[in-house]
Amino acid sequence: MPCDIGSRWHKVAFTEEDIGKTVTVSSISSSSLSLSIDGVIRTDILKTLFINTTMYGWSFVICDVDEFINGDIEITTLDNDDCDLEFLNLEISISNLQIEYTLINSTSYSLFTELSDVPNIYLFNGNGNDDMISCDYPIGTPIFVNTLYGMLKYDPRIITLTNTIEVPINDFSSSADHDCPSVVKTFLNVDGCIADRKSCSPIQYSSALFELNETMIRSFFTLGNKYVYYVTGLRLDDDDIPTPCNGETSRWINRKNESNTYTCDETTFSNSTIKTIITNKLISTLNDDDEQQGMSRVREIIVSCDDDDDELIGAKILINDECWEHAHPDEYSVYDFSIWTRAHPGGSLPIEQFAVDEDPKIRFPQWHDMSRWSTGESEITYMGKLGEIINFANLETSVQQIDIANLIGAVGARSDEGFEVCGSPGEVGNDPTLGNMYRLLLGDDTTVYNQVLDQEEDPSYSYQKSVVWTSVSFKATDQLRQRVAWALSQIFVINQDGVNLNSAIESYSVYYDIFVRNAFGNYRDVLREVSYSPMMAKMLTYLQSKSYDYGGTYPDENYAREVMQLFTIGLYQLNEDGTHKLDDQGNSIPTYGNDDILNFARAWTGFDRQSGRGNIEADDIEDANNHIDPMQLKSNWRDILPKKDLYDGYIGDGYPLCGKKPSTLFLKKGAIYRYRGQNPLPELIEDPSEYGNDNDHSIKRFNLNISTSSLYAFLCNGSTSPINYQNNNNGEQQCNFKSQIILTETLSCDGNECDVDTARVVRFNYTHNDTTVPVYYEYVEPPCIDLPFTENATTVSSRGGRQWDSNPKCVDKSLYEAQGTCCLSPFDNDVVATPLECEYYGEKISFFKAQSRCRELGMDVCKFKRSDNSDCLDSYYVWSTRNCTTDVQIESNGLIEIIHESELEWETDMPLDNDNYFEVKWLNDSYPSVDMNSCNNEYDGCSIHGDTCYCKTEIISSPVFIYEIPTIHDIETKLRIGAFDPSLYDNDEYVECTTISNDNVTIYVKTSLSSSCINLDFNIDVIFEIKDQTDESLFYLNLESIVQVGNGAYEFRNPPMMISVLEPTVRDAQYEVEAVFDHLMGHPNTPPFVAYRMIQRFVSSNPSPRYVKAVARAFKIGTYQGYGTGKRGDLAATIAAVLLDQEARSTTLLHDPNHGQLREPLIKLIHVLRAMEYKHTTQHTELDLRTEDEFGQMSYRAPNVFSFFLPDYQPTGSVEKAKLVSPESQLLTAPYIVGFINGLISLVNWGFSDCYDGFFLVNGNSCGNSGLANYDKYMAGNLTYRPTSTLTSTEDIIEEMDLLLTGGRLNEKGYDIMISTYDNKLEETVDDDGPTSNPLFKALQAVQKLFFMTPEFHSTNGNKLTDEERVVTPNETASTAPESYKAVVYLYFVGAIDSYNVLVPYSDCNETNSVGDLYDQYVEVRTDAALDKDDLLSIQVPNNTQPCNTFGIHSSLEIVKTLYDDNDALFWANIGPLVEPITKTEYEDESKEIPPSLFSHNKQELAAHTVHAEELTTAKGVIGRMMDALTLEGYLTGSYSINGNIKILEPEGISDDYDVVNKYNGVVQLDSSDTSSDIINLMTNLTSHVSESIYGETWSQKLRETLERTESLANSLDGVELEQDWTATDSIGSQFEQVAYLIKANQQTIHNDRDAFYVSMGGYDTHSDLYDKLAENLDDVNAALTSFVEEMKLQGMWGNVTIIAASEFGRTLTSNGLGTDHAWGGNTFMLGGSVCGGQILGQYPSDLSDDGPQNIGRGRLIPTTSWESLWNAVGGWMGIVDESNMNTMLPHLINFDEDDIVSSSQAFTDEGLCTATSVSKKKSNSEEEIWTDLNIALVASSSVIFFFMLVGGGVFLYLRYKMGQEAAEKEGEGGGGDKKKDNSMKNAKGEVVVPKSPTSAPPTNSHLPVFVSTTLSNMRSTLDRRNNKNRESPSIDRPSKTKGGEPYLTL
């Protein structure tokens, strides 16, 4: 509010809040104008300063505003969108200020303080001298103040509050801007939560009825500043509005008093009966008591009158001279529109103006579509209907204003006790004194404006998160912490595209703060926080992933894969030194397989965002999505079944059995209680909602006796000491409640505490301040496990109607899982039982407790039929004595499902075929199987059930150690079941064996069996204790539980379950997630994995195994040279080891050519800014970098989850020769190298601006006005470094800069060059004047730029030069264009496109499977991932060549459909990486080799790009090898990547290396400004000799190659223009545009014979949002291809170009509920003028079900076609003839039979041939007619059959020749292709072919029999007539496709 201390005022006339508003210009004098918005004058302005002195009276829309004096305001006229008009933003100066808007006329400076960093912004200091007149202005009123500073305007901004973990908010008052900011209690903040606070306790109001009439509506505004209105003007043009006759509620409005001009044109009903029914219904409501009906102008009725006539919609009926009109269901409803004063897209005025005009109604604009209402209505608060009597107590709290409550007599109070506040890390309030303006996202960009915090800062919304990162990273004093955080963020990657919250700022910053906070914490905490982060859940798509049991779809696999591959253990098992463990064949051993992914995917189910809250960013007002706080787990979404771990164990191993809990565990040491305040409901478990009413005294609570209960005493004050009652406080209790309490001692039980098995929520009364309130604490059970197969089981059941034997389950009797009922005899059957009394509602007891309680009553548990009613039994299971078994159903792959069988007639909740399968470890991998004929008969306890085996089970429980004392190693490897601390058992139940010990193992036995300590005769109750590395005790039970089936022939270990079958809880779900963290952190791979990654980021790309081992050891033991806590995963110890190891500090290693690394470009830039003392200007206090396109790095903009570069990336050159890696080299592309250099040159020359490719975007900047002379206005800042004043010699200055920029590593040659450059600049004459004209400054600039080019600056080791001079060989070129040019464009879909939604079975399918039609099976298998036929474009395939004759392609790919129909496109079905052909059986038997790391993005990308599966990391790219082969065969070749460094183009060194071109800017050249004209020669001199350092040499070589190639390519492209205006301008469209330019340039200047191009597009890893994301992506692809194809045709090159689409793998046919997961085989397409289109190559699967011959589970299909097949065809088309060259290109080609490989003649046609296995080209209209004529001829003469047999080929040739002439006449010359002529009828493989174009004249009639000659003559005449007819037609259809004018025909 304006009177609040710290309120913000500004001096400028316009702010960013005015963007989009209309400014009106008025003339106020001969020399002045006034500028007004919404009728309020903002400032006066001289006419000479405005755009045009004649424009007064005009109105303009504001496009953009610079919020500083003399800043630019961009405007446009109302009928124009150009925003090309500007005027200056002046100080507020109003000569005729409206008095009602004046707040104060002050003569005091003390009331306001100007911000030092942000001029013209003032903060109000307070009303110290009572100068303030009034603050009673409605919200939104423009308020001005006259001060000695000048006129100021009140500038309301969003206010955020401080609410940190350390200081959670403690005094909160609800306001229009805030909901309660208190955070839900989580692992992150639990220790900081403060109990017993009123801060966010709701105000409870007493009941008070009032009428929601117009007067009250106005009161909400006048008293509470709430914009409450009833809405009118809602139209009935929504298709969803039903007629009043449909039996639903319809609304009718009395329009009589609405306006003086309203007339009632009563509707004429075609059916008078309908009118009577409606009229009578309305009259009956009018006769009701108005107070009950509550409305005099609104009526709602329900009528069923069997009439859907639209005439009833909007009908009007006169009743007693009053007009009642059928209206929109929301017409005259009352809403609070306050949120829309901030969120309305058209600004606040349209919402506020009605209240200002004292109008209680708001009119929906007639020009708005009604969809605006249906969308926006959900975002405002509904209050009731106009005239309705409502209860104030029932209103939403946001509208329960205190003044309104006082008006109507509602009494409200906020409780002083019983509530809790929790904070969030780093959640501080905005402080306007600090400067800098950021946005607060309050809704998505389409509906809600981003709100402004504090001062102006210019970056666009999507960049502000990066601005925060850059500014903090640059300014922070804790640079090591920042570097560690940056390193961690490159392991746990999220990016803007993946999270898809482009405008969010806080959400990204909060995520990144995980790494800042935990930089020296523990890696496990990082892993936990990241895994619970909603940002990571969106990035890796496990947000709202659900169990199969809940959703019927498989859980999302994405996070399960990446949390292992990228965050913890990697792909291969490691030794402690980071080297790979190898199997007997010398192969690396994978850490996990796909079955492990399936298991762990179930561990990431149940995660969802927390509910929205105040004080945070939210991207959706309706849902208030919370992307800040750690996620919640939803127990009903959670997969509860056992989960196998990575070492044949299970998640949950090591935890104690729930059935072995010590009695009254809730009173034992270590018990945890969580504060619930006055809320009776638990948080981590679930009780019925009706238990939440504390005022319902019929609900039986677990009450503690405050006089005698030790538990109460502990909860009250943290000890068992007597409670302190102070007499001077009237004996009131003095409790110090804690948010979470852990019992530090075992307590004695008191009263009913002694009678229960466990507690859920305990209650006691607390008296304070003369008020007694209840206080609740929730008991948190410790983690434990159940064994799902149990020998000690009985049936539990729950209520089903009146019955209590419904939903039976089979449960271990020892578990506290159910309640009890009693019968007169344990042998009673089907009787009515008596329910046991519970100690508290919700109590759970064991079977034995139920039995004991029943027997105390002289009764027993029995097989009851139903029970008398009891509140104790509601919603809970009840014990019975009905027998049950836990059996097993076994899939053919060994997966099992648990089956509960009970005596009850009802099917159990875990019946046969429940489909909830999971993996177990079978002994010797042997199990009964139908497929293996080992599921025999009932004698074996197994029977065949469909294709599964159903078996009875036998559970064998036995001790592991009997006669031996185990070692620690024995216990850790052989005992899998944990135990509770023996000291927790009552009555000394366990005793320690003090007479024996071994290797620090302590043994406990039952006291009754203490002799076993002496006799060494251990049973299953023995407990062993060992210590972990932090000296914490671990307890294990001497028990092994085995499940046997098939009469003992098969067995597996009884798997642990951490979540109860009967009561899945949030608590146990959290415990299971923690167990997953423990498993991953405890994995032996994690220490070396993290160690290697951190060393790579800080010291060396190729650390020695010794170094890795040292760091891994520090990670493992948690300490290093005094750093660390001793806990595994300690990052302080890890980083200390990284930085203090001899390998990091040795000066000797500085000279090792292989030591060190190349530096990341973003770190180099921050280094420059800090070392060269960057200072910002007044207007740009933050660092707004735009660098992802310039050099490939920017925070939150990594290209994918693998970050900016791969850890094993190996560039060509010196690094590759050394067989080492250099991750950062992946960013050394020509555009990035030049972009980085240009940006630094610009920074030196022009300051921080966008001049000459500078890194900073300054709006309105002009390089001509830039430079230091116009520092403040046109730059964001400048480098201010000056050498130390005491340095006088050039040598000293260079040495200082050497130290600052290269760590003193500059070699002698570089040193000499720097000195000479500096001295030469000192001697130059400076022509310009001004601050930059000093020769010393020019000299400094020159050497700064030169330092930025040195290898020492870009690498970290020494740069010793050799005597070898560097030679850069230019790519070979030809002087003339090639006779036969061909090019391949490789279109790569990054992330794995869901290609089974690209090519879909459609119709006319062979019913070869049990489902029938293949499309129906597709729908059944894909479920919600399937496409409707309406979303498909149908295509025909040659009959019977595929399972269907009609397929569908994705409707977005219209160009592919067009090209396919024109025979210029074909599909490859079920293609993927293979080493050799493999069947499903061979895959399962592991008898054939498969590509390594299947389903991993990066490895399978390498497999697709190398087509050399065994050598993924060392093999060169398949296109690179193809260009090598073509070079050997005499072709000039060129390769170009339009999207970064990429493996597929890498050659072996025979052909030239590929060039990288910027997708938007093409060839990026070095800064061409005059100030940098001499830089190239100096750089050339610096890098003239080869370096010994592999990193320095890599930089130098790449730099030199870049300079040479960019200049050459730029010259080649100079002047090249495309044939059309390019329309596809997004990323993929721009890439294709660059390809088009290069192809055009090749024709004009470059003259290669063969070219290859790489383009790519991300966003295809559709684990979620499959439907929309795929369509959106393919729309972009379609636009790009459409433009490219048209351009190629215009260039005449379409026949010379082939486009190959590819992706790393296919996706699962089955859905995960939101998308699909990683698979193997997929489909793709190939396009081109030479493609033999209209066909599908390869074999589309004929059975998509699990039983299909390619399906290896979850719809993962083994490819039936290998990538070798595609590339064999492409290589042949490109011109590879030599078989040895083809085998070198495709090393695995020899593994495939010839029939498995597609030849070039099958896929391409430009050699003049198309084989018989291909499809014929599409016929033109005239051709089709000829075929019709021919058919007639066939019918007319049977002798024609002989004619076809005899000379059919000649007829075909002649027909095709004539149709080729027709097509050529229509289309003209076709483009390109080799013109090899061949009349042979068979190719080399013996396939029947027909020439596309005869090389000689067509056969004449004289060569044919007479009747044939006659027939041909007739057909000639027909053709001629048709041709003439077509020529005469003014509208000519597109002719059939021909290739370069060469028609062809296939037999």
Image (spheres, grey):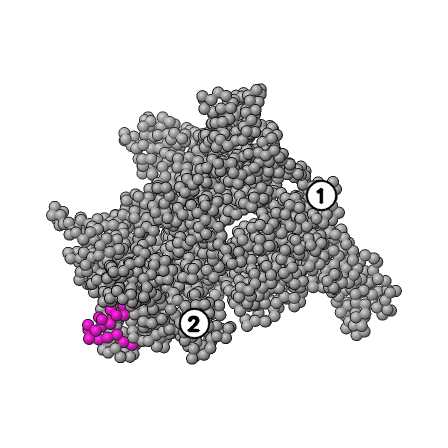
The amino acid type of the residue labelled 1 equals His
Q: Marks 1 and 2: which is nearer the front?
A: 2
- Marker disc for residue 1050: 2
Residue 950 in percent (x, y) is at: 44, 74
Residues drawn in magenta:
843-865
Residue 14 in sight here: no
Measuring from the top left, give residue 625's x and y in whole percent.
40, 51
Pointer 1 residue: 1647
CA gap, disc 1 and disc 2:
70 Å
Q: Camera-side residue: 892 or 1030?
A: 1030
Nearer the observer, 1195 or 1013? 1013
With respect to residue 1785, does 1485 lie above or below? below
Q: Residues within 10 Å of mark 1 (few under 14, many from 20)?
A: many
Q: Image height check: is 1034 above or below 852?
A: above
Residue farthest to the right, as pictured = 1902
Q: Please give left or right for residue 1777 compared with residue 116 in the image.
A: right
Picture quarter containing residue 1927? bottom right
Q: Quadrant of the N terminus?
A: top left
Is residue 845 a member of the stretch shown in magenta? yes
Q: Is residue 97 left or right of residue 1589?
A: left
- Three-letter code for the amino acid on which mark 2 is drawn: Tyr
Question: In this rendering, would 213 be left or right of 888?
Answer: left
* Residue 158 quadrant: top left
